[in-house]
Structure formats: C-alpha cells, structure tokens
C-alpha cells in the first residue's frame, strides 16, 4: 500500500472531479414563461402555480446536490450528476408549471456548462412557439387580459407593452 501526501491526494481529486465552474441550467423556453413564473396573482384553473421553477429548486436542493455528489467520484465525475440534477429540476418544473395547453411545462431546456463550455444540452420537448402559433393560441385561449397583452406586445415587437384590458 502506498501512502500519498495531502497535496498528492488533492491533485488526484482535482484531476478526477475538476476544479472549474460546473453550472447547471434549466430554461423554460417560452416567451411568456417569466410572466407566468412571477405572476403570483394569476389563477391557474387547470393546475400549476407561479414560481414553478424556483420552488422545486429550493425544495429539492438536497436531492440535486446528492445527485452530483453520488457521481463525483464515479467514472464521469460530477458532470453526470449535474445532468441528472438539471433533468430532475426540469421534470419538477414541468409538473408544477401552469397547464393550459401544456407547452409551457414541456418547454424545459436543461443544459450544463463546465467552465463556460457546453457539456450537456437536451432540447425542450416542445419548441418555442412561433409568432403565428402565439397569435392562434391567444385567439383560442381564455387567457387573462394581462397575458394576452404581454403576448401581443412580443408578437408585434412593440417598444412598450399596451394598456390592454381585454376589450376590443
């Protein structure tokens, strides 16, 4: 049995797990995602809630850290654990996002960067809605006037949001 110095052990550990910044992201890729996430006053009659990404992140942070820690000394290092963590967070956000059409929750886009280099990138299950799809959705949706105004503002590429009140 060979013994290592503390410095040798630290060098071996840093080679195995890395010493850079490993960052996981989950982006909900719809133009109205931020509005829905922050809208504490919005009602979701078909289910879901505001803070659908933030709440599971904080509530399950130990689970995510454990996923990373479990993989830390494995063959792939912490990157595989970070991939698992962002996938779990994306799944949790999908379940808790407001559900009217389903496109919001299904547009979770998890990805991982290691020192700014993309090392994992799973595309969303549902693409970012086009301007035409947003127009059609706003015509068919019993959406609150504020959200219709917000969607209209982005589709029309206006400088300032309208004072839309849901009227003609």
Image: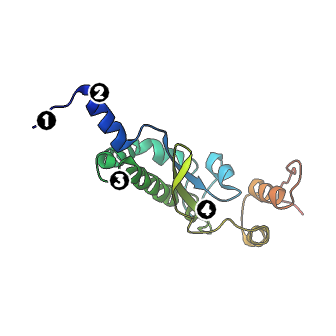
**Mark 4 to mark 3: distance in Å?**
32 Å
* Residue 52 seen in the current view: no
Disc 1 secondary structure class: loop
| Mark toward the viewer: 2 or 3 | 2
Front residue (pair 103, 144): 103
Front residue (pair 124, 45): 124
Disc 3 secondary structure class: loop
* Residue that label 3 marks: 76
* Residue that label 4 marks: 104
| Circles 2 and 3 in contact, beta carbons < 8 Å | no
Q: Bin the neighbour count of mark 4 within 10 Å (Cα to Cα): few under 14, some 14-19, many 20 and up.
A: many
**Mark 4 to mark 1: distance in Å?**
55 Å
**Mark 1 to mark 3: distance in Å?**
25 Å
| Mark toward the viewer: 4 or 2 | 2
Which quadrant is home to the N terminus?
A: top left
Front residue (pair 14, 81): 14
| Residue 147 position in % (x across, y down) | 74, 56
| Mark toward the viewer: 1 or 3 | 1
* Residue that label 1 marks: 2
């Amino acid at each position: 049995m060979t013994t290592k110095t503390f410095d040798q052990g630290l060098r071996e550990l840093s080679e195995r797990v890395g010493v850079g910044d490993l960052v996981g992201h989950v982006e909900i890729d719809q133009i109205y995602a931020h509005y829905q996430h922050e809208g504490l006053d919005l009602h979701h009659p078909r289910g879901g809630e505001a803070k659908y990404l933030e709440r599971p992140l904080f509530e399950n942070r130990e689970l995510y850290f454990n996923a990373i820690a479990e993989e830390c000394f494995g063959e792939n290092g912490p990157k595989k654990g970070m991939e698992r963590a962002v996938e779990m967070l994306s799944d949790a956000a999908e379940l808790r996002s407001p559900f009217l059409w389903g496109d919001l929750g299904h547009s979770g886009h998890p990805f991982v960067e290691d020192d700014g280099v993309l090392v994992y990138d799973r595309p969303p299950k549902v693409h970012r809605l086009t301007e035409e799809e947003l127009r059609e959705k706003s015509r068919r949706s019993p959406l609150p006037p504020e959200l219709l105004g917000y969607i209209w503002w982005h589709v029309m590429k206006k400088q300032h949001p309208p004072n839309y009140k849901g009227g003609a």
